[in-house]
Image (spheres, rainbow, N blue to C red):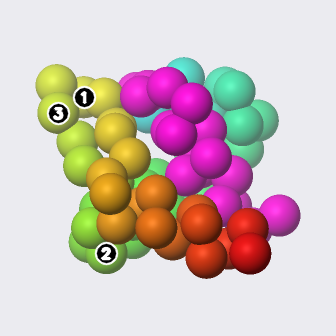
Amino acid sequence: MALRTKVLKYLEKKPSDFLTLTKELDIHGDEVANELNNLLKAGYITKRNSNFYLTDRGREYLKVEES
């Protein structure tokens, strides 16, 4: 499974901060940081009070990936 999909699926279950994501996904910090930055730019996630949240666009992306 691609890192993008892993991150989006995790955030679909519960909003999380950077440190929790790196710990739960067991992925090096730089990889997660780059992917989160790409997801923010694409509008798939949003960041509020240092927590990342899945947006409606991110949910649509997951639906397409799963089909």
Q: Residue at x 31, y 53 (%)?
A: 55
Q: Local crowd at mark 1 within 10 Å, few (<14), some, or many (≥20)?
A: few
Q: Main secondary structure of the magenta part?
A: helix
Say which amino acid is labelled 3.
Arg
Q: Is residue 15 above or below residue 40?
A: above
Find residue 50 and name its label: 1
In magenta, the rendered stretch is 1-17
Where residue 25 appears, as percent x and y from the top left, is 72, 37
Task: Please name the amino acid that badge 2 sits on.
Answer: Ala
Name the foreground residue: 29 vs 39: 39
Look at 49% across and 26% down and name the residue there: 14
Horizontal relation, residue 34 to residue 57: left or right: right
11 and 34: which is toward the camera: 11
Residue 42, x across and y down, in percent: 31, 75
Residue occupied by mark 2: 42
Residue 20's spot in the image, x, y percent?
54, 23
- Cα separation, mark 2 vs mark 1, equals 18 Å
* Visible residue check, residue 37: no
Q: Which residue is mark 3?
A: 48
